[in-house]
Image (spheres, rainbow, N blue to C red):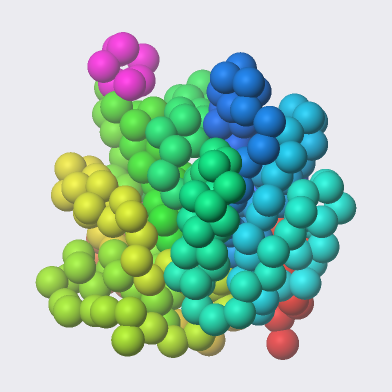
Amino acid sequence: GEVGIQNVDAKLEYMNPTGSFKDRGTAVMMSVAKELGVTEVVEDSSGNAGASVSAYAGRAGIIAHVFAPANAPEAKLQQIKVYGAQTHSIEGPREATTQAAIDYYQQRGLVYASHNLSPYFLEGTKTFAYELAASPAGVPDHVIIPVGNGALFIGAWKGFQELLAAGRIDKTPKMHAIQADGVMPVAAAFAGKRWTLEDSRPTIAGGISVATPPRKQQVLDILSASRGQSIAVDDTSIVWWQKAMASKEGIYCEPTSAAAFAGLQILAEHGHISREDRALVAVTGFGLKDAPPA
């Protein structure tokens, strides 16, 4: 009702074991690592992926080193630790955390279990599409996903393409990538605007605060192929939607997920989604993983 669309569904990815969609990719990535005899891995994460890798590494009996920004939400840092990973807190921008992780695994000859780069991770996130196809409602007209590195966005599209090729669905949805306006490399590129690391600003949507996503071109290609849109939303609208979804729908999502609802509103206002269309928003992480909205 808030966005003027009759049929809006929310897919609660925070119902995964560690509270975010990252478990989809991590389950496959760490299973492969276990099969290959890997005993120690390195990962860098703003929180959710780190917690997921820590949990699945613990189950697999693999030592995990998780590098996280020092300014990551305390709840996420504590979650990483409780699963048993050796945590490394890094000061500076998000990119500094990635570089520290790369230096660490190269110096020690370890395996870099990066959710941003691993092809196995996408093999896990594609199950998002398979679940939608198997649901009673089937595949929606639009899928709205908050995008940082784009692991769920790319994986979901991979799944839809496989399902289409197999004849299990007869259409693929328009894929929409939502970013925070403080860190918007994909949305800017989609709009044909120049955006660099120097243009970045702090945002409460830490899960999509990725200034130099390695898979940016893949995301842009999918936006084109699916005839989707990429837009950036401000922190004020993110907080509003986080509160609204909790108080009106009983869905307490983290700010990153709330960004997707803010994006849905703009997509509807601009006519990219009509009133009769069926839209689905990926609620990628649980609200208790972050600081409560002010």
Magenta-colored span: 162-169
Q: Is residue 291 magenta?
A: no
Residue 19: where, in percent of width, then height? Answer: 72, 49
The percent coordinates of residue 183 (x first, y second) are 40, 76
Confirm whether residue 121 shows in the render: yes
Q: Is residue 142 above or below residue 104?
A: above
Q: What is the tally of numbered marks visible in this picture?
A: 0
Question: Residue most toward the left?
Answer: 192
In this view, the residue in front, 147 or 265, is 147
Let me know if residue 16 appears in the view.
no
Q: Is residue 195 left or right of residue 147?
A: left
Residue 68 position in % (x across, y down)? 63, 65
Location of residue 15 (image quadrant): top right
Residue 163 counted in the magenta span: yes
Residue 171 figure quarter:
top left
Residue at image coords 17%, 79%: 194
Residues 215 and 150: in front is 215
Judge by depth and name the residue closer to the eye, 149 or 144: 149
Q: Residue furthest right?
A: 82
Residue name at image x 27 percent, y 79 percent: 196
Could you tell me residue 214's position as x and y percent? 33, 55
